[in-house]
Image (spheres, rainbow, N blue to C red):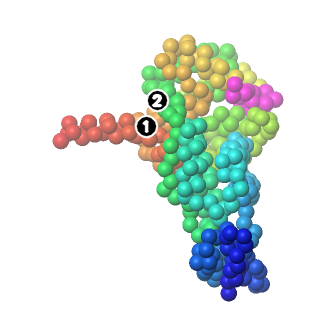
């Protein structure tokens, strides 16, 4: 039975709820009237009867988020962990003192609106995805009764246009030819890493961690990644990142010709440790200048180039998604919507001509 009493100018209500077989008191104040206080008490008692957690131990949203990713996201890459810490910092800054139970849709919309004024849409979307995963866990555990960020609108600044992040077919051919024209004995680690990245779409961290044992019968076996901050081998970005990626035979032949001129040390692209991403990016920039590319991309842009070219040639998106090591096709669709839109326009034109 709820007990309602006045405290100052507002009302406080106290109820008994069952937790782990014993009854405990839970109180909440600040209500304007007895009716509002009793309505809250009835809701809490009904939730408790259904098995939801309604104890006094309400937790800050930032603390819950941290405990969630530390428990459930142990096997993610260092860079992904950095993203989780950034999201936690945003929650602490913009939602101070807000508990998981108190977090509602209006707070969520204001939170993402503020982030949208600071960052690109893609960044805000990533923060929303991470927070959404944590709140789904809270929902499953009965800590909250509804997800407050489902269908919340996302805004953001225009990031670097996606068309600038990948090379077109003429530049792909020119870049490959530029590297092929260098004598194998004179090709650097960066040359060969760029070469393999262009034809596999693998991430820098995945290529840097490759050893000669990872070249297997026309494939590269991606099963680990290189952390250039801690200078250690670690797990891949996600479980789905562990994969075998087929490599064109002419590329494998080039590596077989190139390898005798370099020590077969632990790493393919380095001696005691792999080359840095800065070294690979510096070399890529000089190559793009040399071929007079109208676009300047980073090493990660080779991954976008690889995927975009395959999609433009009509390769099945499920295969492209698996080749990239994406968690699911939805992620591939989100990243490469621009390319699919371009392909769709081409198919529209083709259809109209046929009709």
Q: Earlier in the sequence, mark 1 or mark 2?
A: 2
The residue at 73%/72% (across/down) is 7
The label on residue 338 is 1
The residue at 18%/41% (across/down) is 355
Q: Specify the quadrant of the image occupied by residue 298.
A: top right
- State the residue lying farthest toward the left: 355
Q: Which residue is mark 2?
A: 163
List x then y, in percent, for residue 77. Answer: 70, 45
Residue 124 visible from this viewpoint: no
**Helix, strand or loop for the magenta stretch, by majority:** loop
Residue 160 visible from this viewpoint: yes
Instruction: Label 1: state its secondary structure.
Output: helix
**Residue 309 in magenta stretch:** no
Q: Are marks 1 and 2 in contact (CB under 8 Å)?
A: yes
The stretch in magenta equals 265-278
Left or right of residue 277, residue 147 in this image? left
Q: Vertically, is 32 above or below 271?
A: below
List x then y, in percent, for residue 119. Answer: 58, 37
- In the foreground, 193 or 137: 137
The residue at 62%/68% (across/down) is 144
- In the foreground, 353 or 129: 129
The residue at 61%/47% (across/down) is 127
- In the foreground, 335 or 224: 335
């Amino acid at each position: 039975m709820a007990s309602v009493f006045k405290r100052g100018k507002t009302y406080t209500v106290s109820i008994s709820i069952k937790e782990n077989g014993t009854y405990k008191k839970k109180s909440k104040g600040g209500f304007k009237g007895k009716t509002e206080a009793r309505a809250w008490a009835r809701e809490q008692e009904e939730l408790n009867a259904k098995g939801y957690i309604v104890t006094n131990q309400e937790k800050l949203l930032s603390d819950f988020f941290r405990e969630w990713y530390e428990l459930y996201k142990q096997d993610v890459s260092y860079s992904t962990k950095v993203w989780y810490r950034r999201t936690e910092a945003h929650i602490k800054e913009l939602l101070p003192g807000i508990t998981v139970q108190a977090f509602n849709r209006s707070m969520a919309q204001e939170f993402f609106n503020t982030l949208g004024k600071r960052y690109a849409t893609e960044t805000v979307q990533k923060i929303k995805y991470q927070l959404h995963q944590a709140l789904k866990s809270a929902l499953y555990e009965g800590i909250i009764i509804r997800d407050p960020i489902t269908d919340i609108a996302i805004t953001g600044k225009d990031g670097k246009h996606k068309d600038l992040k990948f090379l077109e077919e003429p530049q792909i051919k020119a870049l490959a030819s530029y590297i092929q024209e260098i004598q194998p004995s004179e090709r650097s680690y960066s040359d060969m890493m760029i070469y393999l990245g262009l034809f596999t779409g693998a991430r820098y961290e995945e290529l840097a961690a490759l050893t000669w044992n990872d070249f297997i019968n026309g494939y590269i076996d991606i099963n680990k990644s290189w952390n250039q901050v801690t200078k250690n081998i670690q797990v891949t970005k996600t479980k789905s990142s562990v994969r075998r990626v087929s490599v064109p035979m002419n590329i494998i032949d080039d590596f077989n010709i190139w390898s005798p001129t370099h020590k077969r040390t632990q790493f393919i692209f380095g001696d005691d440790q792999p080359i840095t991403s800065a070294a690979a990016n510096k070399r890529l920039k000089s190559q793009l200048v040399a071929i007079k590319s109208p676009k300047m991309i980073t090493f990660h842009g080779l991954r976008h180039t690889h995927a975009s070219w395959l999609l433009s040639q009509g390769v099945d998106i499920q295969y492209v998604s698996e080749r990239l090591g994406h968690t699911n096709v939805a992620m591939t669709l989100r990243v490469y919507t621009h390319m699919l839109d371009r392909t769709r326009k081409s198919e529209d034109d083709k259809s109209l001509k046929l009709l």
